[in-house]
Image (tube, rainbow, N blue to C red):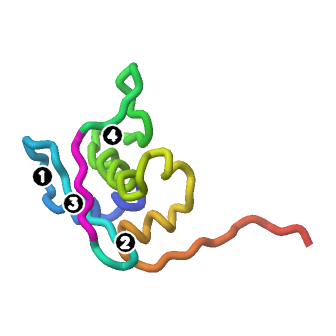
């Protein structure tokens, strides 16, 4: 998520409408098989009994992190289906571009 927020405007570009709204409904633009789709989510975020978010955490007061994660989870059927994974796979859906993964582990010869 930090890589999304690295460039000004990237976060706003993910949302159909950049402003908060009274209805609490947001359209998040994601790419599926190279085609842009709008994933609609509400602003109800799963939390633990102590009020802390159950999944993603933001280092500041940014609410967009929770909305993008919720859209990603909805796209894949549930939060459980999105645990772990390869960041490049998520980037394909957020940016609509090809990605690759580099293996930085040394292999024994």
In the displayed structure, does residue 60 sit left or right of residue 43?
right
Mark 2 or mark 1, earlier in chain: 1
Residue 45: which quarter of the image? top left
Q: Position of residue 15 (x, y in %)?
A: 21, 60
Q: Position of residue 67 (x, y in %)?
A: 29, 48
Residue hosting label 4: 60
Residue hosting label 3: 15
**Prevailing secondary structure class for the magenta stretch in the rendered image:** strand
In the displayed structure, does residue 75 sit left or right of residue 21?
right
Q: Which residue does the image show at 42% across and 42% down from the upper left?
A: 56
Mark 3 and mark 2: Cα distance apart in space: 16 Å
Q: Which residue does the image show at 37% across and 50% down from the upper left?
A: 69
Mark 4 and mark 3: Cα distance apart in space: 19 Å
Q: Which residues are magenta?
A: 37-43
Q: Are marks 3 and 1 in contact (CB under 8 Å)?
A: no
Q: Quadrant of the C terminus?
A: bottom right
Residue hosting label 2: 32
Q: Which residue does the image show at 43% across and 67% down from the upper left?
A: 91
- Callout 4 environment at 10 Å: few (<14), some (14 to 19), or many (20+)? few
Q: Secondary structure at mark 4?
A: loop
Q: Secondary structure at mark 3?
A: loop
Q: Nearer the viewer, mark 2 or mark 1?
A: 2
Residue hosting label 1: 19
């Amino acid at each position: 998520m930090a890589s999304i927020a690295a460039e000004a405007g990237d976060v706003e570009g993910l949302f159909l409408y950049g402003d908060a709204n009274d209805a609490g409904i947001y359209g998040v633009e994601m790419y599926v098989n190279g085609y842009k789709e709008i994933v609609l989510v509400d602003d109800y975020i799963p939390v633990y009994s102590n009020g802390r978010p159950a999944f993603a955490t933001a280092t500041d007061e940014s609410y967009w992190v929770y909305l993008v994660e919720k859209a990603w989870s909805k796209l894949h059927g549930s939060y459980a289906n999105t645990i772990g994974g390869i960041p490049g796979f998520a980037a394909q859906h957020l940016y609509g571009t090809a990605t690759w993964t580099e293996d930085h582990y040394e292999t024994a010869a």
